[in-house]
Image (cartoon, rainbow, N blue to C red):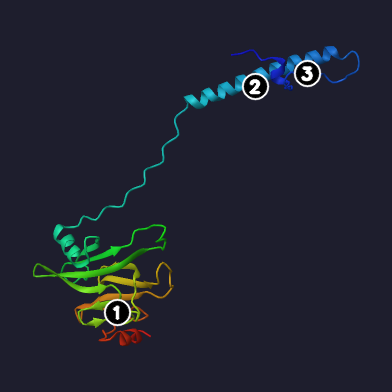
Amino acid sequence: MENLSDSDCFRKPANEPVALPSLPLGTASKINQNRVRLRGGCGSLALGVLAACFLVGCGDAAPEKPAVEAKPVLTVPDDVQSAADSLLGKETTVLLFGDLAKNGKQQFLAANVVPKSTKNELPGTIVTRAVVAGNEDGKWTEILRCDEHLKNQKGFLPGTPIGGVTGWRLAYEQDPEKGLALYFTPLKGAVDTHTLPIGIRWNPDTKRYQSLDRSYEHFLNEAASLSTAHSNLR
């Protein structure tokens, strides 16, 4: 280690000697004594810094942050993915499959999901189209569709907007007894309209997916026209 000089403890401008302050006569020896003590203090400080660095370097390494657990990827059977692609095209994501309606039959929920980007910063799952399909005798058949409107095999579902919708926020939940419940919120472009979602659930009496009223407890019948379907939910 280099020996510390006076200038290490008393910083001075470049090319300029250190100027000592004017003091009364007879204090020179005291000044020299103070300089010696100060020089020793600087050396002790340097040794202390080195010792601290050594201790930090030799100590145990900081524990790494635990890795974030990845969400399990849904393994979709080939026949389910193939049926979804045939209904909505190749850019189709199967979101759920299984006994969704709790009726003992296989169904799947698939959608054209809009990826998150600077053009889509809306919260939730945003879709342009979605379908629910059921398996009857080994053949997949569409039983619910969401595109510009909400429809099942019998007509338009109450609550569907009269004007065509280009995007929906899709949410869903699975009840162990009632089965799958879907909630579609219409969007206007990239703007959140803050309207109430349209609830849809499997009706075991009619054996099809139907809209729910505003309490999300009672089923509503389908309508043959859009104007009737829109007014039924009011």
Residue at 85 percent of width and 13 percent of height: 28
Point out the frontmost of discs 2 and 3. Answer: 3
Q: Nearer the viewer, residue 79 or 199?
A: 79
Measured from the top left, where is residue 32 in percent x and y?
79, 13
Q: Is residue 191 left or right of residue 233?
A: right
**Which mark, by number, is residue 132?**
none
Structural distance between the alpha carbons of marks 1 and 3: 90 Å
Q: Secondary structure at mark 3?
A: loop
- Please identify, in this view, whether the residue under mark 2 or under mark 1 is nearer the observer: 1
Given the image, on which type of amino acid does mark 2 rest? Leu
10 Å crowding of disc 2: few (<14), some (14-19), many (20+): few
Amino acid carrying mark 3 in the image: Val
Image position of 25 (left or right of 148): right
The circle on residue 45 is: 2
Q: Residue 153 is drawn in which quadrant?
A: bottom left
- Residue located at (37% from left, 72% from top): 185
